[in-house]
Amino acid sequence: MSTDTRFHHDRVDLADLVAIADHEPVRRRAAGQAVGGAVILVLAGFVVAILVTNPGFDWPTVGRYLFDVSVLRGIAVTLELTIAAMSVGIVCGVVLAVLRQSGGPIPRSAATLYIWFFRGTPVLVQVLFWGFAASLFPRIGLGIPGGEFLVSWDTNEVIPIFAAAVLGLGFNEAAYVAEIVRGGLLSVPAGQSEAADALGLGRLATLRFVVLPQAMRAIIPPIGNQFISMLKMTSVVLVIGVGDLLESVTQIYSRNYRQIPLLIVASIWYLVMTTLLTLVQARLEKRFGRSLSRVGGTR
């Protein structure tokens, strides 16, 4: 056998060894995936068996109350609370974020103090505070501090429990939205503001037409997450008697003592609502991403 032939055979053998070595990790990964899939299927089977055979879940009761009028009314209140509280949170949060970015030390310090306080205290405490505000201020109005009111109103009439829930949730949410918006504003290159300033745009016009549209790509995903979290967080208003979804099922199982089935009803509806909000969030992210891509392509 010539030297060239022997070299050729050696090279083929080496190539075969490399191919075998490349296929071994693939086979191991496939085997690991098959074992993992089998374990997941077995666990899923156990879960399904428990859900079907355990009488404590009481699925007939779940079906009976899934579309109950009081439950549907609670869903409507939950959605109203979510939208109202997030509206308060977004508006106040944007203002706080702008104040934190301002050059003045007093506005910046005030915004920082607000965020520190509302992020540092539990939302449940804040909701309770607004719910029991009348015990601290029985009447609110206009007048001389420490003296008589010139005009006053009963606090419970000015701040009913629904408004108290919105204020408690919304002011708490504003602290988190402020940090989200501030992060989005910082993601926009400083050159954009400088270019707008060179074109003669004022600070508000620059913020509205240049900075905020570009920051939305970084703001929308976490705001969407906060919206979904707010939907579930509204359940804390149970403590002040607002008739949301959880309050509705609580009222039902306080009469029939079917706690687990009614809590399953609430969980199903929370899952439905959060799933719909997730789909809306995905569409918004795609829309803002596409619009910004078009803007970037036309430069």
Image (cartoon, rainbow, N blue to C red):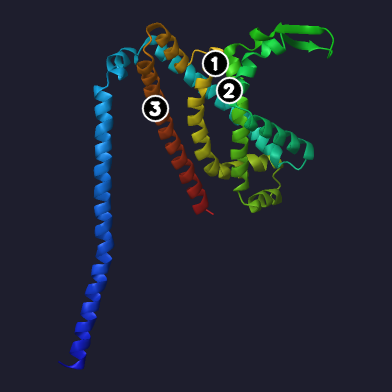
In this rendered view, identify the residue nearer to me: 44 or 114. 44
In this rendered view, identify the residue nearer to me: 235 or 286. 235
Give x and y (percent) for residue 150: 81, 7
Per the image, the residue denoted by label 3 is 271
Give above or below for 22 relative to 135.
below
* Residue at position x 50%, y 30% in the image: 229
- Say what amino acid the circle numbered 1 marks: Val
Most distant residue in the bottom direction: 2
Circles 2 and 1 in contact, beta carbons < 8 Å: yes
Tell which circle, 3 or 2, labels the residue nearer the N-terminal end: 2
Give above or below for 34 relative to 280.
below
Q: Where does the N terminus fall, quadrant-wise?
A: bottom left
Tell which circle, 1 or 3, labels the residue nearer the N-terminal end: 1
Q: Which mark is residue 239?
A: 1
Per the image, the residue denoted by label 2 is 124
Judged left or right of residue 150, residue 191 is left
Q: Quadrant of residue 267?
A: top left
- Say what amino acid the circle numbered 2 marks: Leu
Q: Marks 3 and 2: which is nearer the front?
A: 2
* Residue at position x 65%, y 53% in the image: 191
Give x and y (percent) for residue 48: 26, 29
In this rendered view, identify the residue nearer to me: 120 or 208. 120
Task: Say if residue 88 shows up in the picture.
Answer: no
Q: Where does the C terminus fall, quadrant-wise?
A: bottom right
Alpha carbons under labels 2 and 1: distance apart? 8 Å
Judged left or right of residue 214, residue 289 is left
Most distant residue in the left direction: 1
- Say what amino acid the circle numbered 3 marks: Leu
